[in-house]
Amino acid sequence: MGMNTITKKEIVERIAAKTGLTKVAAKEAVQLFLDTVIEELERGNRIELRDFGVYEIKERAKRVGRNPRTGEPVPVPNRPVVNFKVGRQMKQRVAEAWAARKAAAEAPAQTPSDFQAESPSSNPTGEGSASNWTTGGSQDRPPFS
């Protein structure tokens, strides 16, 4: 299950298409939203978007790191980090979509051997059965096996 990257440009295009706004107006709205989120986090405010999630600043504790070249211990000071906690509705919708994609990817494709398992009584027309395939050889196997 591969993952695609969606850019701000693609989000702007989708918003413009769904709302009838021009791409320029949609881009301004998206950028204004992002700038507002950043500004509020800079002020130390918590941003709660119901059912989407919560952005807040947390302090990462100081620790001792290692210089990768020398292996020497290096003190790393405490610092602020932006934390995002997923909202209930987003968590649920993403989990459901993920499960559906995973199930679709894991569903076995129908193979020629699946057709051979059919008996003439369960398939009265014989359509799709291996016995109707012409291979120039045995009638018991499909042409690509």
Image (cartoon, helix red, strand yellow):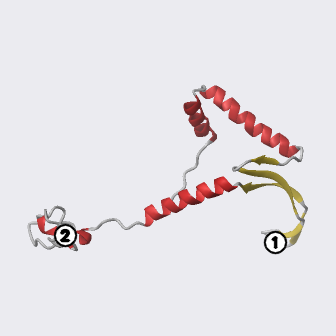
Secondary structure under the numbered disc 1 in the rendered image = loop
Callout 1 environment at 10 Å: few (<14), some (14 to 19), or many (20+)? few
Secondary structure under the numbered disc 2 in the rendered image = loop
**Residue 103 percent location from the top left of the image:** 46, 64
Task: Name the residue located 66 percent from the left edge and 31 percent from the top edge.
Answer: 27
Quarter of image, res 58:
bottom right
Please give left or right for residue 46 compared with residue 126 in the image: right
The relative height of residue 11 versus residue 59 in the rendered view (above or below) is above
The relative height of residue 21 versus residue 112 in the rendered view (above or below) is above
Please give left or right for residue 142 compared with residue 98 in the image: left
Residue nearer the viewer, 107 or 134: 107
The mark found on residue 122 in the picture is: 2
Query: Of the residues under marks 1 and 2, which one precedes in the sequence?
Result: 1
The mark found on residue 106 in the picture is: none
**Residue 30 percent location from the top left of the image:** 69, 35
The mark found on residue 70 in the picture is: 1
Q: Amino acid at mark 1?
A: Thr
Residue nearer the viewer, 89 or 55: 89
Callout 2 environment at 10 Å: few (<14), some (14 to 19), or many (20+)? few
Q: Amino acid at mark 2?
A: Ser
Task: Name the residue located 22 percent from the left edge and 69 percent from the top edge.
Answer: 115
Quarter of image, res 108:
bottom left
Residue nearer the viewer, 55 or 126: 126
**Residue 81 percent location from the top left of the image:** 82, 55
Quarter of image, res 130:
bottom left
Image quarter in which the C terminus is found: bottom left
The relative height of residue 56 versus residue 107 in the rendered view (above or below) is above
**Residue 37 percent location from the top left of the image:** 78, 42
